[in-house]
């Protein structure tokens, strides 16, 4: 996902969202009213269905952990209960190809690896970077390429151009994300170079991060580029992207390492969505086409 050009393309809402989206900026960063995306129904692939573990085939459903506060990947619909976004659309379409219902369970980001490993969830799709260090715990089926970016308050944006320029700032990050490590590492560099202190503010979810940014407690938030761009656009100038995106890695669907046939089934279903055009339609609907992959890969994260 080329940084400058991808971000430029991401600033225009797709027609469906432009017509149906209203935003009221609040202390929690904003509430959105969005209609649920329309995804073409998929035909069951018997060969891929046969790869599913017997218990999943017998119950006819697959349990997937999802987030609810990382738009446009995941967010709550107007009923404040239903999770919508690119990730729910993708995993529902995968389930249709595999001939099973998808049961979505809202979960905290930092709990999903443990939940997949303990088999509380069959899979998880929640904007998690496929990183080498995580591949030792779970298997990833990659569904999108992405990067990390900085979202700054309008007041602070002029002084923030990169992680290096965060010295002297209060920076919000979501617990369990790679950006926690990025900001911690930068805080150490600020101290080692005798620069003003970088204060890291860790919140259990992104709502807390955006609340801190909205109320002035934080000067910046470091997170995934798709939600950073979305929040900047929806804030009507209160928040702005700062500097260029960094560290390009894929987001992946998490699957237990002891379930190799489930990995093959999910990868095969995602590849069919890429091949039949549904994948492209979903990414276009949520304005994240610049993150499209040509092939569904397994453990493709190289860093």
Image (cartoon, rainbow, N blue to C red):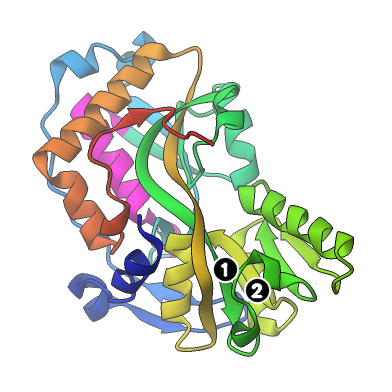
Q: How many numbered markers are drawn? A: 2
Q: Write the residue at 23% across / 61% down.
A: 285
The reply to whether the C-beta atoms of the residues labelled 1 and 2 are less than 8 Å apart is yes
Which residue is at the front of the view, 162 or 112? 162
Q: Write the residue at 23% across / 29% down.
A: 269
Question: Does the stretch in magenta take in 19?
Answer: no
* Quarter that holds the C terminus: top right
Which residue is at the front of the view, 28 or 303? 303
The residue that label 1 is drawn on is 150
Q: Let me know if residue 64 appears in the view.
A: no
Query: What label sits on residue 37 in the rendered view?
Result: none
The residue that label 2 is drawn on is 220
Q: Is residue 298 left or right of residue 169?
A: left
124 lies above or below 69? above
Of helix, strand and loop, which one carries label 2?
strand
* Quarter that holds the N terminus: bottom left
Q: Let me know if residue 179 appears in the view.
A: yes
Q: Which residues are magenta?
A: 80-101
On the image, the x and y values in percent for residue 302 come to 49, 33
């Amino acid at each position: 996902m080329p940084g400058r050009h991808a971000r430029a393309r991401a600033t225009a809402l797709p027609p469906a969202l432009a017509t149906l989206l209203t935003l009221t900026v609040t202390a929690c960063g904003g509430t959105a009213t969005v209609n649920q995306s329309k995804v073409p129904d998929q035909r069951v692939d018997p060969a891929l269905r046969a790869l599913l573990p017997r218990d999943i085939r017998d119950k006819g459903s697959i349990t997937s952990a999802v987030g609810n506060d990382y738009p446009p990947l995941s967010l709550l619909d107007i009923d404040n209960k239903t999770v919508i976004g690119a990730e729910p659309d993708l995993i529902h379409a995968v389930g249709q190809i595999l001939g099973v219902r998808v049961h979505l369970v809202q979960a905290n980001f930092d709990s999903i690896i443990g939940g997949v490993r303990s088999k509380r969830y069959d899979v998880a799709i929640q904007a998690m970077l496929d990183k080498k260090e995580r591949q030792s715990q779970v298997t990833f089926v990659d569904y999108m390429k992405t990067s990390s970016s900085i979202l700054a308050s309008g007041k602070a944006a002029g002084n923030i151009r990169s992680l290096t320029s965060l010295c002297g700032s209060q920076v919000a990050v979501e617990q369990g994300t790679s950006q926690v490590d990025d900001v911690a590492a930068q805080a150490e560099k600020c101290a080692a170079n005798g620069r003003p202190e970088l204060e890291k503010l860790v919140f259990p979810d992104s709502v807390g991060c955006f609340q801190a940014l909205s109320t002035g407690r934080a000067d910046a938030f470091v997170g995934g580029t798709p939600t950073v761009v979305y929040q900047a656009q929806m804030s009507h100038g209160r928040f702005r992207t700062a500097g260029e995106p960094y560290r390009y890695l894929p987001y992946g669907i998490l699957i237990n390492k002891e379930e190799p046939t489930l990995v093959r089934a999910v990868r095969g279903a995602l590849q069919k969505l890429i091949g039949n055009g549904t994948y492209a339609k979903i990414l276009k609907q949520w304005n994240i086409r610049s993150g499209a992959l040509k092939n569904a890969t397994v453990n493709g994260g190289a860093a």
